[in-house]
Image: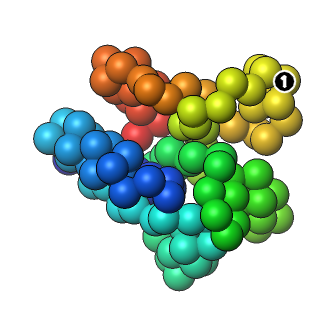
C-alpha cells in the first residue's frame, strides 16, 4: 500500500474522481469539503503523506487553510499540492509554501507523476 492522501475540495465530483483514480493505484484517499474540515481532521491526528488542495472553496478556502497549516508546527512538514481551476502565477503558489500546482482540468498521468513524488 502506498501513502495516505487528503483531498480537499468543495466539488464532490472532483473528490469522487480523485478517489477513483488514486485508490486503484494503492493510495488511501481521505476527503474533506473545505479547509476547516481538513484542518480538524489533521488536528485530530490524521497524518497524510500528501494534501491535494483546492483554493476556491466556501468557508475556509485554500489560502486560509495554508496559513493555518503553517501556524501548526506538527503539520508544516506535510507537502501540499494546489489543485485548482484558477490560473495563478508561480510566485503566488510559491508564497503559499505549496510543493506543487496542478491546474484543473488535469490529466491523470500528470496527477500520478506529482503524487508519486510525495505519497
Which residue is at a point 58% across and 36% down the rendered structure image? 84
| Residue situated in front as seen by the camera: 67 or 75 | 67
Which residue is at a point 42% across and 24% down the rendered structure image? 106
Question: Which quarter shows the C terminus?
Answer: top left
| Coordinates of residue 85 in the picture (x, y in percent) | 57, 33
| Residue situated in front as seen by the camera: 87 or 81 | 87
- The reply to whether residue 70 is in sight is no
| Residue situated in front as seen by the camera: 68 or 108 | 108
Q: Which residue is mark 1?
A: 91
Picture quadrant where residue 96 is located: top right
Picture quadrant where residue 28 is located: bottom left
Q: In this image, 97 relative to 7: left or right?
A: right
Q: Residues within 10 Å of mark 1 (few under 14, many from 20)?
A: few
| Coordinates of residue 105 in the picture (x, y in percent) | 44, 26
| Coordinates of residue 67 in the picture (x, y in percent) | 81, 57
Q: In this image, 9 relative to 75: left or right?
A: left
- The reply to whether residue 9 is in sight is yes
Q: How many marks?
A: 1
| Coordinates of residue 33 in the picture (x, y in percent) | 48, 64
Q: Which residue extends farthest left?
A: 24
Q: Which residue extends farthest bottom?
A: 44
Q: Secondary structure at mark 1?
A: helix
Q: In this image, 7 relative to 102: left or right?
A: left
Colour basis: rainbow
Which residue is at a point 69% across and 58% down the rendered structure image? 61
**From the viewer's perspective, is residue 66 above or below residue 98?**
below
Q: In this image, 106 relative to 25: left or right?
A: right
**From the viewer's perspective, is residue 24 above or below residue 35?**
above
Amino acid at each position: 500500500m502506498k501513502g495516505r492522501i487528503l483531498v480537499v475540495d468543495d466539488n464532490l465530483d472532483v473528490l469522487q474522481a480523485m478517489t477513483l483514480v488514486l485508490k486503484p493505484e494503492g493510495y488511501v484517499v481521505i476527503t474533506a469539503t473545505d479547509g476547516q474540515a481538513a484542518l480538524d481532521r489533521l488536528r485530530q491526528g490524521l497524518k497524510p503523506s500528501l494534501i491535494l488542495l483546492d483554493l476556491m472553496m466556501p468557508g475556509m478556502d485554500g489560502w486560509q487553510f495554508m496559513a493555518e497549516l503553517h501556524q501548526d508546527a506538527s503539520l508544516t512538514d506535510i507537502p501540499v499540492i494546489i489543485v485548482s481551476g484558477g490560473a495563478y502565477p508561480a510566485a503566488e503558489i510559491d508564497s503559499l509554501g505549496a510543493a506543487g500546482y496542478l491546474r484543473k482540468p488535469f490529466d491523470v498521468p500528470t496527477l500520478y507523476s506529482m503524487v508519486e513524488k510525495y505519497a
